[in-house]
Amino acid sequence: MSVLPIRRSYLVLKTIHKAILKELGVTFLLSLVSLNFFLLMEKVLRLSRLLSGVGASVQDMAKIIFYIQPQLMLLTIPMSLLLSVLLTYGRLNADSEFTALKAAGMPFRDIARPVFILGVGCFLCGLLVSFSLSPLAAIELRDSISRIIMQRAPMAIEAGIFNTSFKDLVILVRDKPAPDTMHGIFIYDNRNKKEPKVLTAKEGHIYTDKNADLSLYLKNGFIHIGTAEGSTELFFDGYNLSLNLIIDGPSRKNSELTPLELLREANKRAGQEQIPFFLEFHRRLSLPFLCLFLMFLGPPLALISGKSGRLGGLTIGLAIFTAFYIILVYGENMARSGKVPHYVGAWTPVVILGIASLWAFRKAGLR
């Protein structure tokens, strides 16, 4: 006779967990999309300034946005986890469903079990993004931007229009018989502030040099170089002019390295040169591990935020991450200056949040 109540209790518990987990999942996805969209705006504005100058298409921009997503997800996955828990469990508390579950004899840890499932899933996804997807996407992002610049940069220069797409250069051409060929060229080169140049040429041709950099080969021209002491005038039959866009083309960065590659690069160096690689390595690990602590912090905080509605949960979640990020940046700066070891600067905010999470969960379970 004792089997039947246990069976019924198990089925009821499973149904409740399934309903809460479904609401958590939907809220998590909506939070992830929203946060990625907001964080994406700054990067898109900066890249659009670069790519619009070379005539990038909508398809090119869509590809760039896609490759940016994994780098954002390292931060937005734990943020979305906390926000989804605060919003979902806050609603349960506001609608008195949380109180009803506790009154029915369900322990706090059982009520929070769907959060543990989602939290472990976020932790595993975070590791996948950190170790694999983010470095691969960063490499593809750099290669895509380089290809777009090389393929479309010649189209950025139009006949009869002053072009300022290239860094500290103003280019005016009389006509363009072909996308990579120009006649009647006038260029003001202010890249060397102490020696600005004015160049004119009868003909020019845009090409990619042996280093895969964009260059302009000028024929039959004249250079006027101004200095504080005077000026110099030169005539030339041929002259190579390198072209740099307003935002420098992407180079290989720490974001393109896997955690193991970061450790190898750090071991090749000594002293302060190791710090940036170690900090990037710790950040790749600490952000996924953050999910394991947030799944303990979310339900207790929801008991507070639920009384103030969804806006209260959103405010608390953003406030926690603002404080976490401030401490993280401060710790990393301390590590870069050599005042604390790199692992202390990187893991201090995670440890603080972890202790606070376990304490809050234990206290909520005793109520």
Image (cartoon, rainbow, N blue to C red):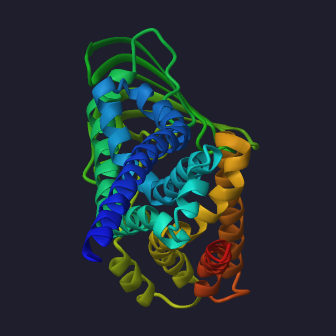
Residue in the image at 59% along x and 53% along y: 86
**Residue 97 picture location, percent across and down:** 56, 50
216 over 163 or under it: above or below:
below
* Residue under the point 68% across and 60% down: 320
Along the line of sight, which residue is nearer the eye, 42 or 225?
42
Expressed as whole percent of the image width and height from the top left, the position of residue 238 reads 34, 36
Q: Is residue 32 visible?
A: yes
User: Which residue is nearer to you in this view: 138 or 230?
Assistant: 138
Q: Nearer the viewer, residue 241 or 103?
A: 103
Q: Residue furthest front?
A: 1
Q: In the rendering, at what x and y percent does residue 172 appear?
A: 47, 18
Quadrant in the rendering for residue 216 = top left
Q: Is residue 321 visible?
A: no
Q: Is residue 138 above or below residue 283?
A: above
Q: Is residue 62 above or below residue 131?
A: above
Q: Identify the image quadrant of the N terminus.
A: bottom left
> Image quadrant for the C terminus?
bottom right
Q: Residue at x 33, y 22 (%)?
A: 155
Taking 154 as reference, is 107 left or right? right
Image point 32% across, 69% down: which residue? 5
Query: How many marks are shown on the rendered structure?
Result: 0
Q: Is residue 245 placed above or below 349 in the rendered structure?
A: above
In this rendering, position of residue 354 left or right of residue 280: right
